[in-house]
Image (cartoon, grey):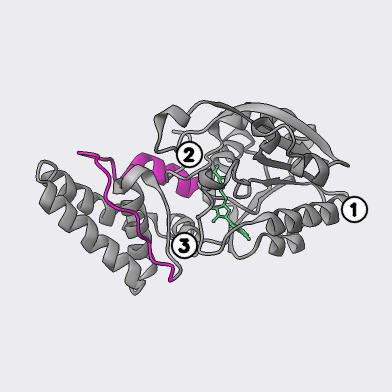
Amino acid sequence: MRAKPFLKWAGGKTQLIGQIKEQLPNNIKTKGFTYIEPFVGGGAVLFWILEEYPNLKNAIINDINQDLTNSYLTIKHNVQDLIQILKRWEVDYHSISKNQEKKKEYYYEKRNLFNTRKSNQTTQSALFIFLNRTCFNGLYRVNRKNEFNVPIGSYETPQICNEENLLAVSKVLQKVEILNGDFSETLKYATENIIFYFDPPYKPLNETSSFNSYAKDEFDDEEQIRLKEFCEILDSQKHQWILSNSDVKGKDPKNNFFDDLYASFNILRVNARRSINANPSKRGELTELLITN
Ligand SMILES: C[S@@+](CC[C@H](N)C(=O)[O-])C[C@H]1O[C@@H](n2cnc3c(N)ncnc32)[C@H](O)[C@@H]1O
């Protein structure tokens, strides 16, 4: 089985993979190539690349969300223990699937335990995956105190432990270095034969569609500018990169934010479908940006 994302994560890039593939350098298939993804999230592109190009020398992934990167680390180093815990909780949860009160009690108990952040790394990762599978729409949202505050979802018997996929993910993660920090810290890993793929939190298309709360700190316009400056540094060092973002101009023709910011690079507009949106009428076709140097 091919490894695929083990979480539901906002902005999953499965829909864009075909277009990203077209932008990859031809020599990515050769041995000795390194892939770096500084905003890895659910890792849709990462897992696709690892399976598609088995010759890849190694990969470096990073995310600022420590609950997320700890889950990658647990799957890499301790997948069997993780599977045992998740299997047990899946049996528990399915056995009370028809009893809404009991399910709520079970869910909020796990959520409280997660928020104490006192469990060992494997249990903490199991809690993270459990909440992702059972919460409302697979959302991730924390308050200022970094407490996960998404309510229970309405799934009757959600799959909590996909053993086959966790094992496949663990296998491909063996050649992946997992970092937890700001995207800019990946600079020191930039050597020869490298490709960076950036999938930052998208700039909201309008004030109310803000879906930018992956972490307790917001990724605002200043952050978008800081990211572009980082891309300029990579470009000056002759490293190749691909970056995706929302197409604010598609929504408002007068909004030239990205067209101005990345004016000296290549900007492509591609069709992409969003999968996480509470309002089904908003799950329509949208263009997104793929920018390369
Ligand atoms: C759009 S998501 C990535 C989606 C992912 N590539 C996928 O396909 O599912 C953006 C990620 O950036 C992370 N992030 C936000 N600010 C960051 C920063 N300053 N440095 C690194 N990661 C950051 C968030 O935690 C989030 O997981």
Identify the residue under disc 1: 236
Q: Nearer the viewer, mark 1 or mark 3?
A: 1
Checking the image for residue 210, the label placed there is: none
Residue sitting at 77 percent across and 52 percent down? 228
> Magenta residues?
145-171
Quick check: 176 above or below 180?
above
Q: Which amino acid does label 2 sit on?
A: Ala
Residue sitting at 79 percent across and 39 percent down? 259
Q: Nearer the viewer, mark 2 or mark 1?
A: 1
Label 1: few (<14), some (14–19) or many (≥20) C-alpha neighbours in 10 Å: few
The answer for how far apart the CA atoms under marks 1 and 3 are is 33 Å
Identify the residue under disc 2: 3
The verdict on residue 188 being magenta is: no
* Quadrant containing the N terminus in the rendered view: top left
Q: What residue type is labelled 1?
A: Ser
Checking the image for residue 70, the label placed there is: 3
Residues tagged 1 and 3 counted as in contact (Cβ below 8 A):
no
Q: Which amino acid does label 3 sit on?
A: Asn
Secondary structure under badge 3?
helix
Residue 209: where, in percent of width, then height?
52, 43
The answer for how far apart the CA atoms under marks 2 and 3 are is 18 Å
Q: Which of marks 2 and 3 is nearer the N terminus?
A: 2
Relative to the observer, which residue lies in front, 21 or 78? 21
Secondary structure under badge 1?
helix
Q: Indicate if the residue with disc 3 has its beta carbon within 8 Å of ligand 1.
A: no
Residue 93: where, in percent of width, then height?
18, 48
Q: Quadrant of residue 227?
A: bottom right
25 lies left or right of 72: right
Label 2: few (<14), some (14–19) or many (≥20) C-alpha neighbours in 10 Å: many
The verdict on residue 150 being magenta is: yes
